[in-house]
Amino acid sequence: MKIDHIAIKVSNLEIAEDWYTKSLDAEVVYRDEKYIRLKCENTYIALIDEKHYPHNHVGFLVNDIKDLPAEHGEVVKHRDGTIGVYVKDPFENYIEYIWYSEEAREVFLK
């Protein structure tokens, strides 16, 4: 399974964007008031506003919506056309299985 993104909670999106773009030479591919998606050479980093998102996580790409393990975690239909299922590992770390609609693929998987 392919890693889609690494989500990092931050208290200030503007400061985080400045630091990550300069430190990692990352490119902003999406931005709104709660979330900034950065493209690094081999993956994406999601800077997530800690006021709106409960936990850091690693996102794994699911190519078919039927492969989302809905029975094993919390299903979240995101405003951007993606659907995620958040599952806790035995150590309280979160994994997100994420599926992209065709429209979301055009925006997020550049």
Image (spheres, rainbow, N blue to C red):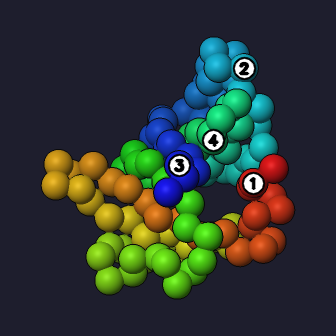
Identify the residue under disc 2: 25
Q: Which mark is residue 69?
A: none
Q: Residues within 10 Å of mark 4 (few under 14, many from 20)?
A: many
Q: Residues within 10 Å of mark 2 (few under 14, many from 20)?
A: few
Identify the residue under disc 3: 3
For this orientation, the residue located farthest to the top is 23
| Residue at 57%, 80% in the rendered image | 65
Report the amino acid beneath label 1. Answer: Leu
Instruction: Please say if the residues under marks 4 and 2 sit with CB atoms less than 8 Å apart.
Output: no
| Residue at 76%, 37% in the rendered image | 28
Identify the residue under disc 4: 44
Report the amino acid beneath label 4. Answer: Tyr
How many numbered marks are there? 4
Whole-percent x, y for residue 79 in the image: 65, 70
Report the amino acid beneath label 2. Answer: Asp
Of the two numbered discs 2 and 3 on the same chain, state the one appearing first in sequence: 3
Whole-percent x, y for residue 18 in the image: 68, 22
- At mark 3, the secondary structure is strand
Identify the residue under disc 1: 109
Residue 49 visible here = no
Of the two numbered discs 3 and 1 on the same chain, state the one appearing first in sequence: 3
- At mark 4, the secondary structure is strand
